[in-house]
Image (tube, coloured by chain):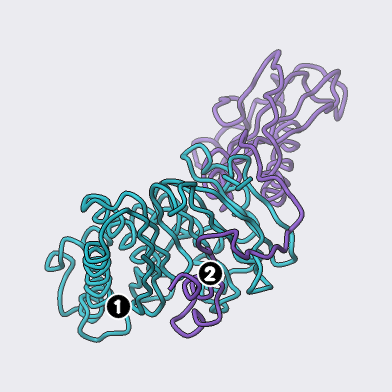
Chain colours: A purple, B cyan
Amino acid sequence: MRRSTAAAVGTLTGAALIVGVRLSVQPPAPPAAAPSQVNLVDNPSTPKPTATGAASKKPSNAGAKKPAEKKGAFKDGVFKGKAVKNIYGTIQVSIKVDEGKITAAEATYPLTGNSATINPPAIAALKQETLKVENAGDNVDAVSGATYTSQSYQQSLQSALDSAKA
Amino acid sequence: MRHVEQVMGTAISIELADDRSPAELAALVGEACDWFHLVDARFSTYQAASEVSRLRRGEITAADCSADLRHVLDACADLWRDTDGYFDAYAGGLLDPSGYVKGWSVEVASTRLFEAGSVNHYINAGGDIRMRGHHPDGGPWRVGIRHPWEAGKVSWVLALGDGAIATSGTYERGDHVINPRTGEPARGLRSVTVVGPDLALADAYATAALAMGEPGLTWLAKLATDGYESAVVTDDGRAFSSAGLPAAV
């Protein structure tokens, strides 16, 4: 994993945090077909901060191992960012690199947390319709509505039905 | 036989459509009303001597409470989990299980009526209805859902044999439903109706969706797989319903 690729994925992860709400309402995107998946989280070659004394004894030799590449180019493949938790759930971004350029970027929808329950995938949504205004008349036996008090019952349609039956 | 009882801060309408003697029907109605008054005395947050009030003041612990109250506390905890925290008996700070108690007490009353031989009846507690069997003329019960702006009109008419219809809305008692995430009154939905087998759950689901606001539309859609259908009107007058809503024809 190149440092530049890690930076790109990191930036996308941050973006995903910001747009988490919007992403959560979109249908799940199928995972990109991965010719060579590298998980940043577990990849041992991921650059780590060198804060410890042991690490600072010797300069990192990561640069020496770098294959020759054009400056600014990314290694081809599909790279997944670290799964990040926010209050809307867990989001994970991935990018696809072809010929050294990012050709696709996407984020998973939250699988856990609030959005997972409020915005579950693959559930038929309620359908929108015209709000009707009908006279109930003799057509109904009872009326359901927001809870009325003993007082407001007197003005309710249910009260009228009860009076008619009494 | 139709009877209206003033109890639990609202009016409860009971209709028994069974072919029984007036004396038998009156006795059944009387037993149901006794039960509702017992529930009121035990669960009211307005009566200082109620079990809920004593629990609130710390005079008793949950272990000291009646089996009914312990059931209600357990059910509220389950619903808190099942609704992602949006049905919250502590949304206002102190314990207030009223949002569960009303539907549950009607559910219990209807079961007792059924076991006592009334197979055709409905109980409407302040707008939340449990029904069984059929109406006096033989067809399914026909229930109107009140139009959220015009009190004398209905927006839907549903036909139901056995089942429950609960509606939560902001038009009767104002901002009484709190979004527990924000502590602010619920916004976005004006009326949420949930139809399903159990009134206690239907009522709690309707209240939870109202607290969620517009994201509640998607949450309600998920309930259809559990047998709970819904009809919703937003604050700006858009209407939504689930595919399985039992509309009358």
Q: Nearer the viewer, residue B122 or B231?
A: B122
Task: Determine the chain carrying the residue at label 1.
Answer: B
Q: Is residue B95 left or right of residue A111?
A: left
Q: Amino acid at mark 2?
A: Ala
Task: Determine the chain carrying the residue at label 2.
Answer: A
Q: Quadrant of the N terminus of chain A?
A: top right
B167 over A5 or under it: above or below: below
Residue occupying the point 83% across, 19% down: A98
A108 over B220 or under it: above or below: above
The residue where tag 1 is placed is B44
Q: Residue A44, image x and y in percent?
A: 56, 25
Query: Residue B112 sits in which quadrant?
Result: bottom left
Q: Is residue B39 left or right of residue A166?
A: left
Q: Nearer the viewer, residue B181 or B105?
A: B105
Q: Amino acid at mark 1?
A: Ser
Q: Residue B69, image x and y in percent?
A: 22, 65
Mark 2, residues whose alpha carbon is within 10 Å: few (<14), some, or many (≥20)?
A: many
Q: Is residue B159 left or right of residue B235?
A: left
Q: Residue A65, image x and y in percent?
A: 69, 19
Give the SS element for disc 1: loop
